[in-house]
Image: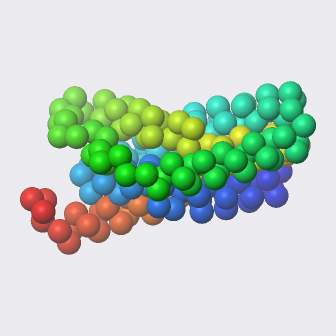
Amino acid sequence: MIDAFSMAFALVFIAELGDKSMLLALTLGARYPGWWVLSAIAIEATVIMGLAVLGGVLAGAALLAGVVAVGSGLAFIGFGAWSLRDDGGDDDALGDVRWRSGALATIAALAVSFFLSELGDKTQVAALSLASVERAGRVGVWAGATLGMIAGGALAIAAGQQLRVRIPARA
């Protein structure tokens, strides 16, 4: 289980660097209190990685390991190609919405934003493929992937908080 945890943590943390959800965490970390954004990431990561591990369990039971490995590799290549495209869209998922309902409503809205940005993401595919081959360490894969995502988000939030201090809000 420790090996599965370590492998999942490292893989998801590295995959998260520069990912769209990390950029979202950086942006929101500059706008909202850091613990709100980190709470939202923790909620989202717990759920999304749980779904990925469940998908891995189902894929591992239904498919041969070689098929899962080839499919995961093709998915990573596809995500890489997809991330190179320029959609011309706004990277700020929440736009100019002002949340006046308090911390819990804001955290819930942020968690939904992170959840939607992570659906089908390379970190989710990584957790799914690890869970499909790590039969004895699936809880470790879930915990490692979840904490890897939270650690990547915390890094981005810290950078966003520093941006807020150094750059005026109008800029």
Task: Find residue 146 and report its horizontal and vertical position in percent.
Answer: 61, 47
Quarter of the image for residue 13 reads: bottom right
Q: How is the image coloured?
A: rainbow
The answer to whether residue 92 of the structure is visible from this angle is no
What is the residue that sits farthest to the left in this orientation? 170
Image point (26%, 67%), residue name: 163
Front position in the image: 144 or 61: 61
Image point (80%, 32%), residue name: 59
Image point (62%, 43%), residue name: 124
Image point (90%, 37%), residue name: 64
Report whether 7 appears left or right of 103.
right
Report whether 117 appears left or right of 128.
left
What is the residue that sits farthest to the bottom in this orientation? 166
The answer to whether residue 99 of the structure is visible from this angle is yes
Q: Is residue 6 above or below residue 129?
A: below
The tally of labels here is 0
Report whether 58 appears left or right of 45.
right
Report whether 110 appears left or right of 55.
left
Q: Is residue 95 above or below residue 61?
A: below
Task: Find residue 26 and report its horizontal and vertical position in percent.
Answer: 35, 57
Task: Find residue 171 and report its horizontal and vertical position in percent.
Answer: 12, 63
Task: Find residue 42 and report its horizontal and vertical position in percent.
Answer: 50, 43
